[in-house]
Amino acid sequence: MSMLSPELLRELVAEARLAPSVHNIQPTRWRLAADCRLVLLDDCMVRVPVADPSGHDVRISHGAALEGMSLALGRRGLSRSSTSRQRRSSRRRVMRPSAR
């Protein structure tokens, strides 16, 4: 596993943020966990309930952000493994960057 420096994390997130999001709401947030995992978080304060009452578009936006992060990691010679965790009725996407 490769350790992510704060500077590299900022670069990765800045690049991943360029991914499109439905309704341009950018609902994805990233956090670096203590064991060097990137955690994709849902910003539940950013919603368009009239246009997306089921949250489907938000999930599509998270997928685009996850793909953007995968591309950003790949450009730097890193890859990802991912798992989904259920936590308090919300799904969390966890990525563990690793050297190829």
Image (spheres, rainbow, N blue to C red):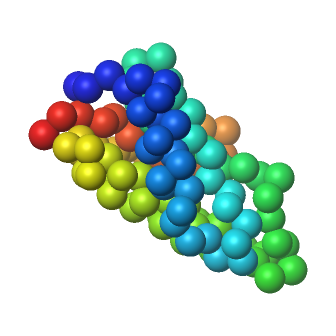
Q: Nearer the viewer, residue 81 or 76?
A: 76
Residue drawn 42% across and 33% down? 8
Q: Name the residue at the right extreme.
A: 50
Q: Is residue 47 above or below residue 72?
A: below
Residue 72 showing in the rendered view: yes
Percent coordinates x, y for residue 4 in the rendering: 38, 26
Name the side, left or right, on which 19 lies relative to 98.
right
Name the side, left or right, on which 57 lies relative to 80.
right
Name the side, left or right, on which 98 lies relative to 37.
left
Q: Is residue 68 above or below residue 49?
A: above
- The total number of labels drawn is 0
Q: Quadrant of the N terminus?
A: top left
Percent coordinates x, y for residue 37 in the rendering: 41, 30
Q: Quadrant of the C terminus?
A: top left
Percent coordinates x, y for residue 5 in the rendering: 41, 23
Q: Name the residue at the left extreme.
A: 100
Residue drawn 56% across and 71% down? 20
Q: Name the residue at the bottom extreme.
A: 51
Residue drawn 32% across and 22% down? 3
Percent coordinates x, y for residue 95 in the rendering: 38, 40
Q: Is residue 66 above or below residue 57?
A: above
Residue drawn 70% across and 72% down? 24
Q: Nearer the viewer, residue 6 or 52?
A: 6
Among the 4 quarters of the image, the one containing residue 38: top left
Residue 85 showing in the rendered view: no
